[in-house]
Image: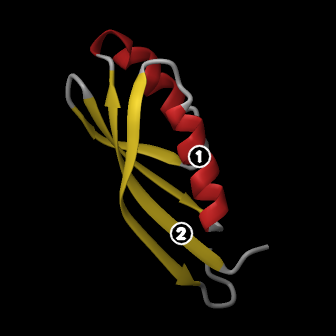
């Protein structure tokens, strides 16, 4: 198990007519959380044990029909102390 925690935030641009479906699919991703939205954009926070896991989740989001782009705007990583999760 990794002793790192990676967190990133994304701006996801969405075709307006696909917004409901895109929101549902993002909410189904285990490590993703919707923080804000309007008619064409979502702010999504993703966390995971490695940079690769974040990139996999970003690729999954980019592949959702109706997503025009998913742009990373923030990334932080921390080494966790023994026993932290």
Task: Determine the residue positioned at 62% across, 78% down.
Answer: 4
Which residue is the extreme one toward the right? 1
Which image quadrant for residue 21?
top left
Q: With respect to residue 57, does 66 lie above or below? A: above
Check disc 1: other Cα within 10 Å, few if <14, some if 14-19, many if 20+: some
Q: With respect to residue 76, does 46 lie above or below? A: above
- Tell me the distance, in whole angstroms, between the alpha carbons under discs 1 and 2: 12 Å
Task: Determine the residue positioned at 52% across, 36% down.
Answer: 61
Pick whichever of labels 1 and 2 is earlier in the sequence.
Answer: 2
Instruction: Say which mark, if any, is on residue 79.
Output: none
Q: Left of 28 or right of it: where is 44?
A: left
Residue 39, image x, y percentages:
21, 22
Q: Left of 68 or right of it: where is 49?
A: right
Asked if the residue at tag 2 contacts the one at tag 1, i.e. Cβ–Cβ closer than 8 Å, the answer is no
Task: Determine the residue positioned at 60% across, 66% down.
Answer: 51
Residue 8, image x, y percentages:
44, 60
Task: Name the one closer to the observer, 1 or 55.
Answer: 55
Which residue is the extreme one toward the front? 68
Q: With respect to residue 77, does 11 lie above or below? A: above
Q: Left of 66 or right of it: where is 17?
A: left
Instruction: Say which mark, if any, is on residue 6.
Output: 2
Q: With respect to residue 54, does 4 lie above or below? A: below
- Mark 1, residue position: 57
Quick one: SS at disc 1? helix
């Amino acid at each position: 198990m990794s002793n790192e925690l990676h967190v990133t935030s994304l701006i996801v641009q969405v075709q307006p007519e696909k917004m409901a479906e895109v929101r549902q699919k993002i909410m189904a991703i285990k490590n993703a959380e919707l923080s804000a939205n309007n008619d064409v954009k979502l702010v999504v926070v993703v966390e995971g044990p490695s940079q690769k896991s974040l990139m996999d989740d970003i690729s999954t989001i980019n592949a959702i029909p109706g997503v025009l782009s998913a742009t990373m705007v923030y990334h932080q990583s921390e080494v966790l102390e023994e026993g932290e999760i």
